[in-house]
């Protein structure tokens, strides 16, 4: 298997999009799968590398990447050494970054014999699920979309229910990362970006307008994004496939760091459902 880690993809926002590719070199075009991590996530979290290898072994060209402003750097792509970047992230940047990765693989000569750029599928976990739904509705290059524990509404996550006056006055608010113990900043620009692009960020409208096959996967023990969000997505796109993973939490019973050489059985089920859907 060929694994190329920490490739620099240039985006629109002055920071590198640090990208990995996994594939078996056959000199035959393979279906492309692009994976988007979620909030406070990164491409090397937990068992995502094992999942990437499993997709490659199933015959796909698998790409995963860090959003340019996720808080990681090229030198340290794991965790959050660049909290300034994290605070300046927003949904516009994440949509642009995903578009830049699609642009890159569609024109990257290094992999020209290995990829079928007419068959690009995108998978998003958690907040990344919302991002891939928005991108699927606006980019005709996307041929399939999969949401893993995906969110159905960005508005209730923009702190519109919080103390906006205080946030505006301070210019920043902080969220504690329970694992790394970092106080992670959110600059007020995040809210302004949401308000300025509210229509573009309407996950419900995007889901209703998706024209490509859509697979919804959710764990019934998810306490971070409740399963009713998946049920909403299915209601808005009744042509979609909806699969429930029994006894699975928000991250399909994986944690970080993941020391096992196999995925959890719940994430294994997720992978198999995705492969069967895309093959």
Image (tube, rainbow, N blue to C red):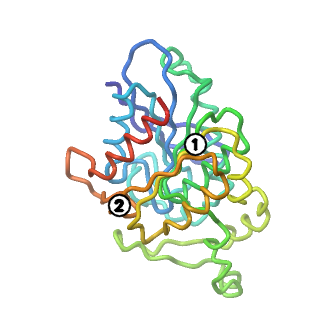
Left/right placement of residue 185 relative to residue 103 reads left
- Where residue 274 appears, as percent x and y from the top left, is 44, 40
The quadrant the N terminus occupies is top left
Q: In the rendering, which numbered label is found on residue 168?
A: none
40 or 126: nearer the viewer: 126
Which quadrant of the figure has residue 117? Answer: top right
Locate residue 104, reporting x and y percent: 60, 31
> How many numbered marks have been drawn onto this rendered protein structure?
2
Estimate how packed mark 2 is, as few (under 14), some (14 to 19) or many (20 or more) residues with alpha carbons within 10 Å.
many
Q: Residue at x 42, y 67 (%)?
A: 222
Residue in front for this viewpoint, 177 or 253: 253
Determine which quarter of the picture holds residue 108.
Answer: top right
Q: Which residue is label 1 attached to?
A: 145
Residue 207, placed above or below residue 139 = below
The numbered disc on residue 248 is 2
**Whole-number angstrom distance, CA of label 1 to CA of label 2:** 21 Å
Query: Which badge, 1 or 2, is on the more N-terminal residue?
Result: 1
**Res 213 quadrant in image:** top right
């Amino acid at each position: 298997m060929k694994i190329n880690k920490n490739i620099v993809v240039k985006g629109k926002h002055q920071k590198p999009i640090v990208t990995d590719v996994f594939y078996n070199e056959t000199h035959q075009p393979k279906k492309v799968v692009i994976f988007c991590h979620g909030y406070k996530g990164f491409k090397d979290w937990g068992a995502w590398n094992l999942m990437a290898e499993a997709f490659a072994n199933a015959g796909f060209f698998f790409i995963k990447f860090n959003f340019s402003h996720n808080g990681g750097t090229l030198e340290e792509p794991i965790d959050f050494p660049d909290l300034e970047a994290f605070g300046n992230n927003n949904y516009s940047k994440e949509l642009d970054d995903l578009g830049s990765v699609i642009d890159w693989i569609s024109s990257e000569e290094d992999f020209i014999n290995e990829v079928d750029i007419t068959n690009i599928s995108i998978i998003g976990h958690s907040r990344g699920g919302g991002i891939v739904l928005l991108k699927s509705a606006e980019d005709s290059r996307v041929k399939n979309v999969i949401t893993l524990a995906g969110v159905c509404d960005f508005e209730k996550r923009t702190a519109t229910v919080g103390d906006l006056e205080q946030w505006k006055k301070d210019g920043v608010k902080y969220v504690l990362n329970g694992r790394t113990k970092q106080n992670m900043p959110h600059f007020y620009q995040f809210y302004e970006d949401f308000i300025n692009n509210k229509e573009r960020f309407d996950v419900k409208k995007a889901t209703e307008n998706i024209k490509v096959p859509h697979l919804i996967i959710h764990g019934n023990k998810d306490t971070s994004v409740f399963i009713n969000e998946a049920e909403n997505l299915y209601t808005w796109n009744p042509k979609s496939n909806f699969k429930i993973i029994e006894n699975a939490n928000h991250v399909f019973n994986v944690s970080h760091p993941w020391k096992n050489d196999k995925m959890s059985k719940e994430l294994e089920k997720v992978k198999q459902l995705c492969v069967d859907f895309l093959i």
